[in-house]
Amino acid sequence: MRVVVAMSGGVDSSVAAGLLAAAGHDVIGLSMQLYDQRSSPEAFGSCCSLDDLHDARRVAHSIGIPHYLVNFEERFRETVVQNFVSEYAAGRTPIPCVHCNADLKFAELAGRAEAFGAECVATGHYARVAFDEDARRYKLLRAVDRNKDQSYFLFGLSQQQLAHAMFPVGHLTKPEVRAEAQRLGLAVADKPDSHEICFVADGDAAGFVERALPDGAREGEMVDTSGRVIGRHQGVHRFTIGQRRGLGLSSTIPLYVVKLDAEQSRVVVGPKEALGRDEMTAGNVNWIAGTPPASAIRATARIRHRHEDAPATITPLPGARAQVRFDDAQLAITPGQAAVFYAGEEVLGGGWIE
Amino acid sequence: MRRPVRIYLDYNATSPPLPEVVETMTRVLAADFGNASSVHAFGQRAKATVDEARRDVAALIDADPGEVVFTGGGTEADNMALRGAAEALEPLGRRHAITTAIEHEAVLNTLKSISRQGWTVTSLPVGETGIVAPDALRAALTPETSLVSVMHANNEVGTIQPVAELATIAREHGAIFHTDAVQSLGKIPVSVRRLGVDLLALSAHKFGGPKGIGALWIRRGVRLSPVMTGGRQERNRRAGTENVPAIAGLGVAARIAREKLAHASDALVELRDRLEHGIVANVPGANVNGDVARRVPNTTNISFDGIEAESLLIALDLEGVAVSTGSACSSGSLEPSHVLKAMGLAHARTRNSLRFSLGPATTRAEVDFVVEVLPSLVAKLRRLTRPAAAVR
């Protein structure tokens, strides 16, 4: 079977490619160039930099598969970066990786893959896909390695996309993946994991937003939960819900950002108790099954990547929205992040926290 | 994995070295290892090899061997010409250079670098034909103009510039005229006398020679400051121990190019036209870019509506067919062509065009295979992908 592998140059996608090739598949490696590498090669973060593209090429060569770069600069700017900037400017905390996965890797890349005669698109994500014989549909499952699980970033996939998706490392643990890389003789076996947002240098999201949107950085007031002004700030995009450090306030009790109001350019801070909420709504909800459940369901919901999903009742609302009522209050429910719904191992769907 | 037959249609990027070139280079590499500057017999033998190659290169371009300087490739020859001339012209105080918008990066970026040293650079427009109008040069000349650089044949669309006419205009104005002939050598007759230029850059690997070797022809009497400083090789023009095997390879390639040029070119035109007509007739929305009459025999540049060249290039490579698009950036991913942009083509068309460049080993069967597979690949891409230009 011909398979296109999205290769970032990291160990996970390299092993994905290596395993597929070793299994006898006709593998084609594609790497996405997402931003202009020439202007300042050192200024970018850890994923998909120029060195990583070279690593991907090197791995492809060593496992004997063709490798190509696809220039997705314009698409990336328009579907991922612009959204990232406008979300921050609107007082939300975005996760660009979800858009990159659904709108680039599994949309644009899949179209190309099919045109190149490939049946599937594989990535190095830690997740699993399975076909449910009874329901005649595909299921998205958590990775075997719970610490590495990336199913949270894949909630936007459609049945059509899952039908052509492969996650060859989803059934392996990270140490096993590194061992496979060693066994396959891949040069990237010891390469450190990437954590940061790839196009933001040094994790400086605020600086990135300011460069992209020079007049988006409006300073404003910092107020407590009763509305009393207790300080000033340099722009709502510099804050995220639950943030404690860097507020520039002196207080006898620890204060946290509890709300961002971009319209009034206002940052609301309060004690830890003010961070807790047991209810939220999500928009642009995607249900993996293709259709929302007929009525409210019991599930667990995860409100950010590093969050233990919590029991909740989820009620589908019209207009691809959903209401999530947690059994227990959750800290720092952050607009712009994704809320992803699980039933045990299975990802039911997810949406964007409003 | 399926191993397709490989069809090479990217001769403008590089050409396979001719068997005679490989044979000569292998022999020279092993046997003539002497330093051409050495006094002893080993040096003399190497020097003789270099001089023989110099005669062959000179003969190919209708020049005097004493005017040929070997360089480490076409890019270095362009650098030597432009930087060397600019520095030598400094005392004149006329710091205006003219070039075209469709030059190779070797010229464009070298002039950009010179402009940071206080020079003004004017870029001549080309229009949809991809050919510079002599009147455009006349209009751009100023009393400050002392250097003009116009390529002979364009690498992407293959159009041939009216270099003889342009050189006359420049020289009447008292300006030095350089031409980058990297893409015309071995494809069409090139005579430095008939072109009337002052400087001409060439590269071996574009016509069956090895990579990393080229030459700059410098008209006797033209003053150039050396760019590479060091020893006194190449009559003080280019320091550094001569790369004797590569120079010998260039010499052989030049000799063969001169012998075969006349009849090879007709055959190439026929094959190129067969490919071009086949594609245009069988792929809806396929259009040839640039002037179809005034171009080198081996090149055709074709745009395909509604797709991205990058994807078509990959799809063709998976079928075993090697072609290319305009420029590649540092990572190797493809960028919109500055040449097609300069020709005034729409944004989409600067990203949906492929260059097919044929060579002496190209066969009719290969051309027919491309014409056969291309229509369905284009149709598939149109159905399954959307060009970035449509995303905005």
Image (cartoon, coloured by chain):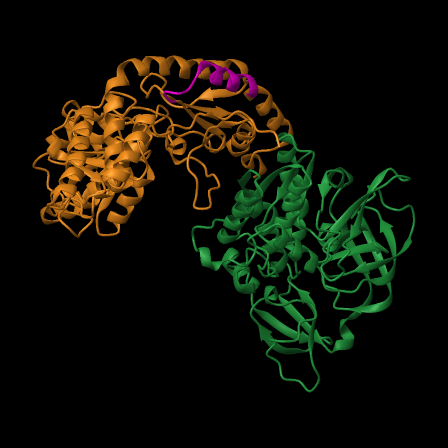
**At 70% from the left edge and 71% from the top edge, which residue is drawn?**
A242
Q: Is residue A45 left or right of residue B212?
A: right
Q: Is residue A42 above or below residue B136?
A: below
Please tell me which residue lies in front, A324 or B333: B333
Tally the marks. 0
The answer to whether residue A307 is above or below residue A125 is below
Which residue occupies 32% across, 16% down? Answer: B265
Choose between A202 and B219: the one closer to the eye. B219
Left or right of A250 on screen, residue B124: left
| Location of residue B181 in the rendering, given as x and y in whole percent from the top left corner | 26, 30
Which residues, given as a range, are shown in magenta? B359-373
Q: Is residue B381 above or below residue B104?
A: above
Q: Is residue B370 magenta?
A: yes
Q: Residue at x 62, y 61 (%)?
A: A195
Q: Residue furthest left?
A: B221
Q: Residue B86 location in percent, x, y?
A: 17, 45
Q: Which chain is orange?
A: B
Left or right of B289 on screen, residue A225: right
- Furthest residue in direction bottom, as rendered: A252
Horizontal and vertical percent position of residue A344: 86, 56
Q: Quadrant of the C terminus of chain B?
A: top right
Whether residue B203 is in magenta: the answer is no
Q: Is residue A224 left or right of residue B168?
A: right
Q: Tell me the green chain.
A: A
Query: B92 or A210: nearer the eye?
Result: B92
> Of residues A264 and A92, which is closer to you in this image?
A92
